[in-house]
Amino acid sequence: MAKNFHSELVVANYDEHIRKLIPGYELVHQQIDAILTTHLPEIAHILVVGCGTGYELSYLLQRHPNWTFTAIDPSATMLEQAQKNIGLDLGSQRIRFIQTDTQSLNQDNQFDAALAILVAHFIPSENKTEFFQDISDSLKTDGILLTYDLMQPENKTELKILQKMAQQTGLSIQQSEKMLERLQQDFHLISAQDLAALLTKVGFKHSKIYCQIMNYYAFFIQK
């Protein structure tokens, strides 16, 4: 059965579970902060697509007091948890939370940057072009997009390696087997090469892989 991100139980356990599933989860966000800090001005507006429980929002809010954020997620449960996790002390007044997907974004080139972290691999293959087009249309000229997603494994050996890594980071054997089942149910994977071609198709002028951990690839993308 596919994981239900509208479930309160799933959302409550998300932050603990994701660190066991994703190798280098903390490093991912350190890299994101370093890249954004290098490329963005002191005052910037950032779109967070699929904000989940708000970890990257919390991380960036603490480091950049002059940045504002628009955070979207189709799950009301996720958004509620993000608001709880961030709280007033972290500057939630600098975030606009919206229950929606990219199709409902105002395509007015308003954002300096966008984040889509562990999101695009859930988008059906036939909808990925529209997904990235929506984000591109919402960015300012020369705006940047950072993604981090699971890419299509080339063979079963790569899946076994991914499973072993998940066991090393805390999943039980049974949980890691369930993880592989979910790859068939929840994920819509393409190769890194196909993603790069798709990004060019929708009008991004530059993209490069800045990090790879196992089959998880991070892309720096510029409009």
Image: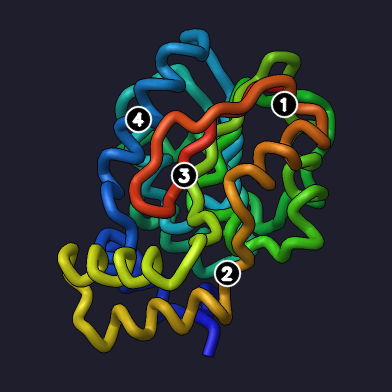
Residue 44 left/right relative to 195: left
Type of amino acid under label 3: Tyr
Q: Quadrant of residue 137?
A: top right
Identify the residue shown where x is 54% and y is 83%: 2
| Residue drawn 52% across the image and 73% down it | 5
Q: Position of residue 223 (x, y in %)?
A: 71, 22
Kind of residue sitting beneath label 1: Leu
Alpha-carbon span between mark 1 and mark 3? 22 Å
Q: Secondary structure at mark 1?
A: strand
Give the mark toward the camera: 1 or 4.
4
- How much space separates mark 2 and mark 4, taking CA atoms? 24 Å
Residue designated by label 4? 31
Residue under label 1: 139
Crowding at label 1, few (<14), some or many (≥20) Cα neighbours within 10 Å?
A: many
User: Which residue is farthest top?
Assistant: 41
Name the residue tied to disc 2.
187
| First of labels 2, 3 by sequence position | 2
Number of other residues with Cα within 10 Å of mark 3, as a class: few under 14, some 14 to 19, many 20 or more: some
* Callout 4 amino acid: Gln
